[in-house]
Amino acid sequence: MAADFSFLERSLEQERVYSFTIPGCFERLLHPSVREHIDVLEQGPDRMVVRGTHVLFPGCPEGVRAINERFGVDLPPEVDDFYKRWNGGLLLRRELYRLLPVSEVIATALELRRIVKEPTDPARLPWHVLRFCDLGDGWYLALRRTAPRAWQVIWTSFEDTDTDLLFPKDPKEDANGVLDPSYLAWLRRMEETDGWPWGGRVRAPRDWPPGTRIW
């Protein structure tokens, strides 16, 4: 039985207005693939007000099979179901969530391992960490395998190696980076909270969301 994404479908056509005050978000909002779907109501050096909806791209008929085959993993059915319907996109909430398409999930995993000089051969290091969401400024959300068919959502940075994430030196700090027990649970929480807090315990109390919903 396919995963139930009706909660997300209901919000796809909901027009909303946000005021963003973090310049790092501006570039993503103005990217051609997103800009054509939103209206910029106000733009200045420290504030951008936009009106629009979520932007999700047409699905990949084969789902995440390319990821599974490339890295020798078996992503859960809910992730496969999602990508068969939507091959990435951008969720417009109080934080911007750029969901990577299948090709970019693969490219990002390979590129980050090359940069930190970790093995790119699955036989040498299990591919148990796959970044699927780019938060900008070097921050990502990733799927980390905890069992053959169980993948939790974690928060990570560009600098974290897969070895660090698979074999953490500080279990307490690692636990604080676990956001949700599954991909579907993460999507549901984003819907219920309008995308904030994206990291729960990993955010300091003084932190605030990049965007404020006006309407």
Image: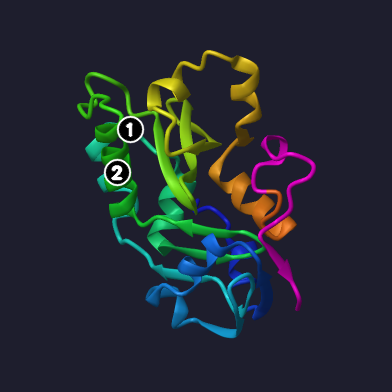
Q: In the image, 59: left or right of 54? A: left
Is 203 on the left or on the right of 130, as rendered?
right
Classed neighbour count for the residue bearing mark 1: other residues with Cα under 10 Å, few (<14), some (14–19), many (≥20): some
In magenta, the rendered stretch is 198-215
Looking at the rendering, in which quadrant would you find the C terminus?
bottom right
In three-dimensional space, the C-alpha distance between marks 2 and 1, rounded to whole angstroms, equals 8 Å
- Regarding mark 2 in the picture, which secondary structure is present there? helix
Is 99 in front, or is 111? 111
Q: Residue at x 55, y 71 (%)?
A: 54
Instruction: Determine which residue is flagged by label 2.
Output: 67
* Residue 73 badge: 1
Q: Quick check: 102 above or below 43?
A: above
Q: Which color mode does the image show?
A: rainbow
* Residue 199 spot, x, y in % from top left: 65, 42
The three-letter amino acid code for the residue at tag 1 is Val
**Residue 146 in magenta stretch:** no
In magenta stretch: residue 207: yes
Tag 1 or tag 2, which sits nearer the N-term? 2
Q: What's the residue type where badge 2 is placed?
A: Ile
State the predominant SS element of the stretch in magenta. Answer: loop
Residue lying furthest front in this view?
45
Q: Residues within 10 Å of mark 2 (few under 14, many from 20)?
A: some
Q: Give the image location of residue 187, x and y in percent.
A: 60, 52
Residue at the image position 59 percent from the left and 23 percent from the top: 174
Q: Residue at x 48, y 59 (%)?
A: 98
CB of mark 2 within 8 Å of CB of mark 1? yes
Which residue is at a point 58% across and 76% down the rendered structure image? 53
Horizontal and vertical percent position of residue 144: 47, 31
Q: Position of residue 202 (x, y in %)?
A: 67, 35
